[in-house]
Every structure is written in structure tokens, then in C-alpha cells.
Amino acid sequence: MTASRGKFSSRFGFIMAAAGSAVGLGNIWGFPTQAASNGGGAFLLVYLVLAFCLAYPALMAELIIGRHAHANAVEALRSVSRGPISRFSGGVTGIVGLIVASFILSFYAIVSGWMMAFCVSSILVLSGFETIAAWFVESSLPRNVFFMGLFMLITVVIISQGVKNGIEYWSRRLMPLLIVTLLLLVVYVLSLEGAGQGLELYLLPDFSRITSPSLIISALGSAFFSLSLGVGTMLIYGSYISDEENLPIVGGYVTLVDISVAVLAGFLIIPAMFVAQHNGIEIFTETGALISEDTLIFTVLPALFQSMGFTGVVVSLVFFFLMSIAAVTSSISMLEVPVAYAIENHQVSRNKAVWAIGGLITCVSTAILYDFETLFGLVVELTTRYSQPLLGFMMCIFAGWVWQRDNLLQELQKGNPSAEAGLFWAIWPWYTRIVCPLIIATIFYTSLAA
Ligand code: TRP
């Protein structure tokens, strides 16, 4: 099996692909919206702490187990197990993970479809078809179903051709471009009137909110979502890394890139909200809650682009194009989870697996669109807020309790012969064994009890 499995060709390629999976709507749509509705600075602070102290260790658990097993999550978790009970739990964790990954893709494709619709609309404006362009930025069932379907089709086609070449090729070229565009937009938005108020909200934490259980669990969910954790995505990507790589370092780069992009996006979106408000667009209700959270950035950003005149149309095109690409490099990493399982454990051909699973997910997305008000928020919440951290908890249990310490060390030593003397080995094993599961469990307990 190992011989037929692909591998990333270089360290940069892997980092860009894993970062491509990590960086996506979670950073630019999810994180800023969550931050804005949870008090800005307080959310940012808790998010940063949780991302470094919980998400990074959990990411490492997935990468290490994945590279060791060179298999999908179900197989990998079973293979590190030592008895029938842990083997069974490993299988269950893997399967629940792939179901959650599929549901995540079902709402992800909807939002990604919006990104593509806005991109197409900018192209039409540039070509002089302004009236038709308006249809693409107005939410309607036909538009939403069409673009969700188109997005799923793109994801399916890429995944059916095998991951490595496609993912690596695109990620390493377009990711850097996205970061530069974001940076330029941040500089622009900060020069506008009203932006200061947003900056203040984002950077000055209201410390009284930091202990709010609902803020903490949202931040935890955001961190796990943003780093693609729990469902086996990173485990699979880990299984494609070459043995020479020093895992803690590569994992560290991925985490840093991901968190930086989220924080950077916050510098764009939150000030942009206040600029929009300054220009008369309603952002908050009278009680101070955000109006239409899910579609917030689709109100705020177009308003910002409009303020730039003609340049704004070009910027809008570039921005929504890059967002669509960022979404694709993430969605392929989700679809690869159930697909790899079907191929490796049920001997289905890649093509069949991709089309069947992709088709099923498209049906689920369509159902969500039909009853958007009820289903969309529900699916987002169940998958990202609850399932992901719980599955991350299981990954820590597997890395910390089930798997043998010697094997763990051996795996790390493959890429770094002196790993035993390093800081990572001094901290991470007991930390993932005790601290991570304890904190995740405590956050859960308090949020459910509250
Ligand atoms: N992390 C990606 C983002 O921020 C989304 C993503 C990709 C994901 N693969 C995942 C989320 C697996 C959860 C699980 O947009």
C-alpha cells in the first residue's frame, strides 16, 4: 500500500499544502465574524492562547500518527492500538471523523459558492454587464444551488486526479498571493474613516468577557476549525509527508501561517465593518448583536470595494478569486478524508469513491440550502463547535495514552535523530497526555453546564 501512496515532493510543498488546507474560509469568514460577535479583543486573546496551547499539540498528534501509519485515520488509529477496545475506539473515532468532515464540506461548499458568485459578478461588471452582475450578488436559491454545485464539481475533479500534484502545485503559487492581497487591503482599510473604532474593538480586550464559557468554546471551535483538526484531514496529510521531515518544526510553520492569516483577516474585516457602519450600513442590531453573521463579510467587503471606485472592482475580483482558491485547497483536504478511507479500506477505485461521496455531499448541501435558516447554523455548530474539539480530544488520547511512547519517539527521530534531547520531547508527550484532554474536557463541561 505504501508504494502506491503519494508523497509531497518537498518541505515547502507540504507546508503550503497543509497551510492551504488550514487557510480558508475559517480564517477569513469564520474567525473575524466570531471575533466580531464575541467582543473582538477578548476573543482574539483566547483564540491565540488556545491555538498555540491546544490546537498546535493536537495538530502534532495527527501529523505524527498519520506519518507513522501511512494510512487514513480509521486505519491509522486502529494500527496504533494495542487491544480490542482501543482498536474499536480508534475505528469509531476515524469513522465519526470522516462523517464530520463530509458534513463540514456540505456547508463549506455553500459559503465557497458565494465567494465564486461574487468573483463572477466582478468579472461581469468589468466586462460591462452590470445588470446581469447584480443577480450574482443577490442571494437566491437557484444562485446558491448552482454555485455550491459548481464548487463541489471543482473539488471532485481535483480529488479524482489524485491529491499531490494538484494541491501542491496550486497551493504554493496562490497562497502567497492571497497573503499579499490581504496585507494591501488591511493598509487601505485602516486609512478610512471609522476604521479606528474597529481597531480598538479588535485590539483592546474587554477582560470581563474572557472567562465567558460561550466565548471560550467558540474560540476553541474556531481554532480547531481553522487548523482542520479532529476529522483526520491533517492525519492524512501527515501520512503523505516524507520521513526525513522534522515534524514539530513543519507543524509549527503550518500553525504560524494559519494563525497569522486569521489575525490578519481580523485587521481587515473588523475595521471594514465599522467603515461600513460609518457609511450608513447597518451592522449591529439595537442589542449590539451582529446582523446576519453568516453573510456579514458579503455585505461589508463589497461596500469596502465600492468605496474604491473602479479599482475596487478589480480588487474585488482578485480578492474573491483568491478566496475561492483558498476554499478549494481546503475543500479538497476534506473530501480526501472519506475518499482515502473508501479506497484503502473498501478497495473502491478513486474515481468511483470521489463521485459517489461528492454526489452525496452535494445532496446534503442542497438540502441545507432548502431550509437554510434552520439547517445551516445547526450543521456549523454541531460539526465545528462540538464534534471537532471532541475528536481532537480523542486524537490526544490516542497519541498520549494508547500509542506506545517508544514508537512515538522513534517516529520523531526519523526526521530529527536528536529528538530525545529536544524541548518538544520534554514537553509534548505528557502535555498531550494530561493537559490537553483535561482542558478540552473542562471547556466542554463548563460550556454545557452554563
Ligand atoms: N481549516 C480550513 C479553513 O480554515 C477548513 C478545513 C479544511 C477544515 N479541512 C478541514 C475544517 C477539516 C475542519 C476539518 O477554512
Image (cartoon, rainbow, N blue to C red):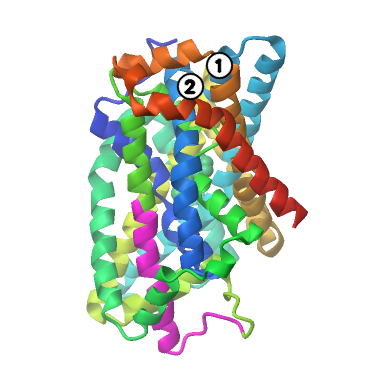
Image: 354 above or below 257: above
Residue under the image location 50 percent in, 25 percent down: 340
Residue 361 left/right relative to 19: right
Q: Which residues are magenta?
A: 260-285
| Magenta highlight: main SS | helix
The front one of 332 and 186 is 186
Residue 116 lies in magenta, yes or no? no
Residue 364, given in percent of the width and then of the height, sits at 64, 46
Query: Which residue matches tag 2?
Result: 65
Image height of 325 relative to 156, above or below: below
Residue closer to the observer: 60 or 174: 60
Question: How far is disc 1 from disc 2 in space, using C-alphas?
Answer: 9 Å
Query: How far from the left and from the top, in percent, is residue 56?
Result: 44, 39
Q: Say which quadrant the N terminus sits in.
A: top left
Distance from mark 1 CB to nearest ligand 1 atom below 8 Å: no
Quarter the C terminus occupies: bottom right
**First-in-chain label (1 vs 2):** 2
CB atoms of marks 1 and 2 within 8 Å:
yes
- Identified by mark 2, the residue type is Ile
Q: Quadrant of residue 105?
A: top right
- Give the SS element for disc 1: loop
For label 1, the residue is: 403
Whether residue 284 is in magenta: the answer is yes
